Image (cartoon, rainbow, N blue to C red):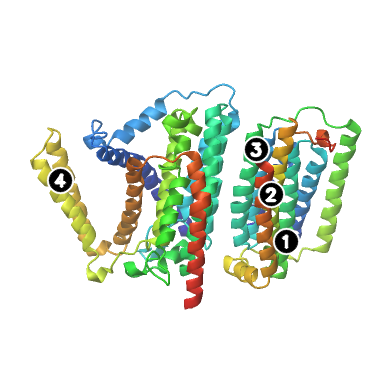
Amino acid sequence: MDFFIVVTLIKIAVIFGVLMTTLAYLQWVERKVIAHIQVRPGPYMVGPHGLLQPLADVIKLITKEDVRPPFVHKVLYMAAPFVAVTFALISISVIPFGPALHVAGYTTWMQLTDLNIGVLFILAISSMGVYGVAFAGWSSNNKYALLGGLRSSAQMISYELPMSIAIASPLLLSNTLSLRGLVETQAGSFWHWNVLRGPFPQVFAFIIFLIAAFAETNRVPFDLPEAENELVAGFHTEYSSMKFASFFMAEYANMVTVSCMAVLLFLGGWYAPFPVRYGSWLVPVVIFAGAGIIALYHGFHAARRRDSYTFPAAGVIFLLVAAVFAAPMVRDWLLPLFWFCGKAGLILFAFMWIRGTLPRFRYDQLMAFTWKYLFPAAMINLLITAFLVAWVS
Amino acid sequence: MDVILFLAFALFALACAINVVVQKHPIASAISLIGVMGSLAVIYLLLGGEFIAAAQVIVYAGAIMVLFVFVIMLLNAGAETGSARSLTAQSLGAPLLVGLLCILSYFVQRLFPHEFATHFGEFTGGGPKEVGEALFTTYLLPFEATSILILIAIVGAIVLARKEID
Amino acid sequence: MAEVPISWYLTLSAALFTIGAAGFIFRRNIITVFMSIELMLNAVNLSFVTFAYQFKKVDGHLLALFVMVVAAAEAAVGLAIILTVVKRRPSMDIDEVSTMKN
């Protein structure tokens, strides 16, 4: 029993550390991706290719003056960012990142806890996440913040409906609410994933879930309540330094959560598209080796003076990682982790890609879209899935 | 372990409930009510009601209370002003309420003596599977009736709260 | 003593119900009165779930779910009524909504 507590504490430390670093570097990735979409370099001054930019941002945000405007509701003004961040981070605790790890005779899963109502838990926590936004908007004693907060919370609760129904459709195929069990029912090759299997492939549910996820996390094209040129930054107008950073951390953590949920529900979790015995262990090796060779090539024909030693260094690191993936002893824990993170990373890249590409919806267009089109579409998808599942079995 | 969890969350629920009734500003009452609902969800988990605990957080704490918070923000409700009723009513009412509570507790303790005890994990019939089976077989008629009730409520709320177009 | 007697759950339910009733009777702000009603409904849910545990049947959970659904419908319509009433007369005191005029 004691060993279990020690292992759980170690897992909490690992997951928390990795998650915090990922959130910081997710912002770097987003800035680089959007910059390259807009044909400009993005951050490249601080550190090689701007890799230390998140560190510079954190230092700036921590040392900035913490302005507290007068006449705000003191308790709620202070508490709102904490509420937002807490609920955003709690939902990471039930997400399984990989299969069981067997270390020295002790078996543990790459998951903090497996609830047998895991999906309902994530839905509950995302319902509670509305409060952070609502309290932030109301307590700021600012009419733009209030309007932004109310609009944003109304948007979030409206889009919870199609999201829940889009979640219910693959649950009909998998018949379990536990996240670990969901992945186990999608074992095998890519045609066993929920998005492609069963009497009715859940393609529409996947698309509806992604659209609702964009709205739940207040991302483009649904980010009117927090856009700078619309409502003077919406519900976080009056927040500065660390509290503002908390809201951003909460937004990125929500993005990570919904991407992981999409992977677990629709894309087969940590299972590779084709089994290991057909060579799916080669895919990460090829990817990283290719990246290493490209980096080394560009290092020898460097465009900027600094690139003549950053690119070869990166190339060597990539080749080392490829060698690590080629080793057979890491195959049963590192490969599933790679596939899970790869799929979630692709969905996060889709988030950033769409941010750089699409314009944003007006608020009434947004609400009309969910109530008139998305919710009926989700219901029709659920009805067809239920009918076909009942017919087949 | 059950005792510690139950006592902690029961005391928190009682404190939040008293706070709901005592606070002057409605937003403080609303936040305390969210606290009551959260701790009740944990107590449902102790009683083996996994589905009902999740439903409590999703429906009550995550939707109904959001509705309350919206209305308080929209109406810009301020703190309640003015004095309460007469002092005799206050000094008579509070002890009578405490007396009612004591009588209720006494009768409850007498009807359910100590050997009716709960253990965590003893009741496993509260999961989503069992609730779903009962909902769609035994309780199908109430399920359909409450669906129509929700539809009526949606239509009624929209009609009541929209602006009059003159 | 590693077990919690059932009477404790029922006492908690009775206490929450009493506090909710007190709030319903003594408070004058419309929204606080409404929140006390929700508190009473939650107390009743708790006793439903407790009795479901005692008889080892799932029916108590079902009844609690229906109570939740009805409470949701009632909250929606009640808050719409509150919005309409408060917009007509700018006061949130239930003592001032005592006439049928206007």
State the SS at label 3: loop
**Badge 4 and badge 1 both on one subunit:** no
Q: Which residue corresponds to the image point at 16% horizontal and 43% vertical from the top-left? A: A313
**Other-residue count near label 2 (Cα within 10 Å), few / some / many at <14 / 14–19 / ≥20:** some
Give the residue type that dot 2 points to: Gly
Give the number of the mark in front: 2 or 4: 2
What residue did someone put label 1 on?
C48
Q: Chain of mark 3?
A: B
**Badge 3 and badge 4 both on one subunit:** no
Give the residue type that dot 3 points to: Ile
Q: Is residue C37 left or right of residue A99?
A: right
The N terminus of chain B appears in which quarter of the rendering?
bottom right
State the SS at label 2: helix
Q: Residue B33, percent across and down?
A: 67, 44
Q: Chain of mark 1?
A: C
Give the number of the mark in front: 2 or 1: 2
What residue did someone put label 3 on?
B165
Q: Which residue corresponds to the image point at 54% horizontal and 41% vertical from the top-left? A: A153
Give the number of the mark in front: 3 or 4: 3
**Other-residue count near label 4 (Cα within 10 Å), few / some / many at <14 / 14–19 / ≥20:** many
**Circle 3/circle 4 CB separation < 8 Å:** no
Q: Residue B73, percent across and down?
A: 63, 35
What label sits on residue A295 in the rendered view? Answer: 4
